[in-house]
Image (cartoon, helix red, strand yellow):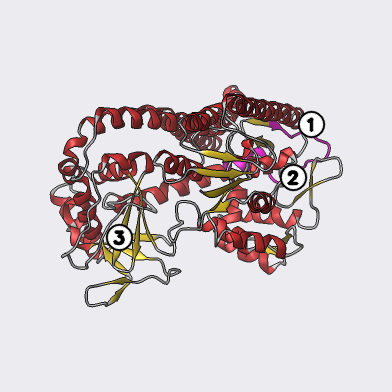
Amino acid sequence: MEYIIYVRKSTDEHSEHQKQSIPDQIEACYNYAINNWLKIKKRPKNFSDFETKNDLIIENKEKSEKNKELYNLSKEYFIVRERESAKEPFKRKKWRKIIEYIQKEEIKWVISYSPDRQARNLLEAWELIDLVDKWLVDLKYPNFHFEPNASGKMMLWIWFVFSKQYSDKLSEDITRWNLSALYNWKALWVYKRWYKINKDWYHEPDWNNFYLLREAFNLKIYENKSNEFIADYLNKKWFYKLTKNNKKEKVTAKRLSDIFKDTFYYWIFIYWEHDVDLIGVSNYYEPLITKDEYTILTEKIIKKKKDHSIEWKKYSELEPFPEWFIITEDWQKCSFYIAKKKQWQEKLEKEKKINPNISLADIVPKKYLYYKVSSKSKFFWKEVNWIKLKNIKAEIFERLIIKNLKNINISEETYEQYKIAFLKKLEQKEEENKHKRKVLQLQINNLRSKLDKLLVNKLYENLDDEEANKYKQERENLEDSIAYYEAELSKLNNSIRDKVLEIEVFFDLLKKAPEIYQKASIVRKRKIIKILFSNLIIWGNWAYLVVKPELKDIFTHLVDLTGIEPVYRSKAV
């Protein structure tokens, strides 16, 4: 009997003043196993299902020698460390893998610090008790005595019920307190750059740098300087923020981009789905810019987005894979590019004079589509003759996708299971979209209010030509901004419905997947890939095609491709 150890502590459980950290849980479970003469399973060579790059980063930063020693146990024994909440069912990837292994009878004995480490929701709790009932798993806990009999299962269920009740009650109490504090204009531990949280828990300007940041907004609003230019300007003025470790952190263009978009800096503090108006109600808060200036700033950001999307659209119609789909073994992105891009652009301009409807997709042959390995990566693609390359033809990966699509064999049962899982994901997406809708609607309401005010103020005024042109331009700018945000809101509202229709149509045609994929447009191909695969990892001269876990059963097997230059293979990870 070889036991595995499962420990868990999610970031959102700090509010519960949870004392048992992951190292503490490892120590308690390990000592329990030793004291009770239980054998702990040795760690397998391939531990990728249970250990992420993020785990290793966190553990390598550990300063405590004792904790480092406990983490080193994980390199010898089968100890699964998870940093995810257990409140929502079927969200934890590592726990789902353990359940999968239990169902396959590859794991039978599990030690956890307590039952609430395994589940804080009743669906997964019932699933675990059902596995105990079928004698598929044996559970041990250092601080809870469990026997797999009727009485033991009843007590385990009661523990899960109380754990769920405690979690829900705590969440309600915290939410109620947060909302009460929010509507009293408290900061709620939300730190805003170059504002400080004072002893009464209100946002207050940090006067050391406040006026310098005001200069940054002026450079953006009135001189239309780039974020890179402004960041450089501020850093030369010794503009910095002290971190928690009292290190001086310079400002970056990316950070400035986030600040310029944040409504907090002119009047509205948004906290999740709630927002409060800070002007005239908080005695401490002072905005950096006015509402009018924020409107100008928003219009600049919108225009930049439009300009960028026009430039990107020229080439995105040729990109065969979703962004971040192809990654290297050291987890760096592979970027899409077109060889001889300028030549094809010139050719397109000539062809458009003859046929206005022609696009780059009609002109550029597939052999000119490449993926370039990031300069940050140490990886090189190796040809048959072991020539090292940083550029890889996209058609190599396309052939891999098509070969594997030929091995799809989907049953009605699998279809129904996936459809249920897919709809659950859509529900999660819908929850995420609520906040985005709130922000967009807020922007629309603000702009409409400004437009109404403008129309009322100018209605009875006698305007000369110059004033009339200025008024017309201001009105058109506001109307364009409103139309833009309304279009974004409409896209958000339609996206869920469109995806449901797409999945139904796609599964009806799944039996002909290779033919459909080959004939599909680039946009449709990317959608098919997103539905079926997580990513494609390139390693040496191999390509590992990672199938989404919920879909692995529809593939009879994944193809081992050989004889194509460069030689590459694929397998499910």
Per the rendered image, the range of residues in magenta is 276-296
Q: Which residue is found at the position 56% from the left and 56% from the top?
A: 55
Residue 150 lies in quadrant: top right
Which of the marked residues, 3 or 1, is nearer the chain's N terminus? Answer: 1
Residue 326 part of the magenta-drawn span: no
| Residue type, label 1 | Val
In primary-sequence order, the first of circles 2 and 1 is: 2
Relative placement, left or right, of 310 versus 64 is left
Which residue position is annotated with label 1?
A: 281
x and y percentages locating residue 129 in the rendered image: 53, 30
Res 479 visible: no
Q: Nearer the viewer, residue 351 or 172?
A: 172
Q: Mark 2 points at which residue?
A: 19
Nearer the viewer's eye, disc 3 or disc 1?
3
Calculate the distance from the C-alpha at mark 2 to the C-alpha at mark 1: 39 Å
What is the secondary structure assignment of the residue under circle 3?
strand
At a point 24% along the width and 51% down the height, the residue shown is 401
Categorize mark 3 by other alpha carbons within 10 Å: few (<14), some (14-19), many (20+).
Answer: many
